[in-house]
Image: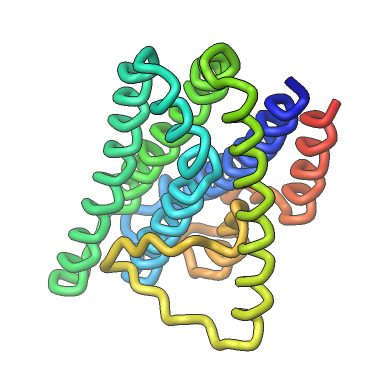
Amino acid sequence: MLTATYTLVALSVEQANIRISLQSFQKYVQATLLRQHGMSLNQLEFACESLNRLYQACHWRKIEMYLIPAIRQATQQADQLLEELGRLNESALNVIRSLQEQVAKSQRDNETCGEEIAERIDNFCDSMLSRLDKEEKELFNLARTTIGGEAWFAIANQFLLHDAHVAEARRCRGALPAPAASARHLLLVEPDDNVIDLVPALAALPVAVPDDELETPIPVSDLQDQRHVNGRRAVV
């Protein structure tokens, strides 16, 4: 069962990193947009793009690409749980679609409600965080009891090949200019990493509240330290 343990440890680290990205973005949005009566089109477009990136990071997790297909093949006991996970995923996706529609509307009417947008973003993050919790508390346990040894070995091998592919793709993309991001379309493009740092970019956008009323966002260095701690805890 060492292969199964290695696989679940790797997934746990990936889950922890995604959770930090969601929570840090959610906290900063609550500390800014909730205190605004309105928001700029740039802020709205960035919020939509940010949720798109977070959704992509969740979509391209190893648990989605390798563990869930293995569970589907091993048993039908997970069907109900997978349907629940799918509903949470669809709820988050609907938030992105609604913000895309809001972007188009704001380009015409030039008005948005910061509190309403913040509530939608909060719903997105809550849906994805709920999904992560269900995966860790229910899906992992089901995987331990239903997936056989050879299947665990195949999953672990897929992880290694995936990491090698991502590292090679990152080297190849390093010399190329980044493509222009669009807030109007949901593009499922695999991110360079499963960690999305959005707080620094959001902090650079102007907000319509005094600086002394804002909560201090989580420093990126603290987030990076926490990810290292997550990795160490998972290994232990």
Residue ID at (39%, 57%): 52
Residue ID at (39%, 33%): 127
Q: Position of residue 20 (x, y in %)?
A: 62, 42
Residue 53 appearing in the image: yes
Tally of marks: 0
Where is residue 40, by image quadrant? bottom left
What kind of colouring is applied to the model shown? rainbow
Q: Position of residue 139 (x, y in %)?
A: 50, 21
Would you say 87 lies left or right of 205 here?
left
Q: Position of residue 137 (x, y in %)?
A: 55, 16
Viewer-nearest residue: 144 or 59: 144
In this rendering, is residue 84 above or below 164?
above
Residue ID at (64%, 87%): 175
Residue 35 appearing in the image: no
Where is residue 179, by image quadrant? bottom left
Viewer-nearest residue: 73 or 219: 73
In this rendering, is residue 164 above or below 70?
below
Would you say 3 lies left or right of 79 here?
right
Q: Position of residue 101 (x, y in %)?
A: 18, 59
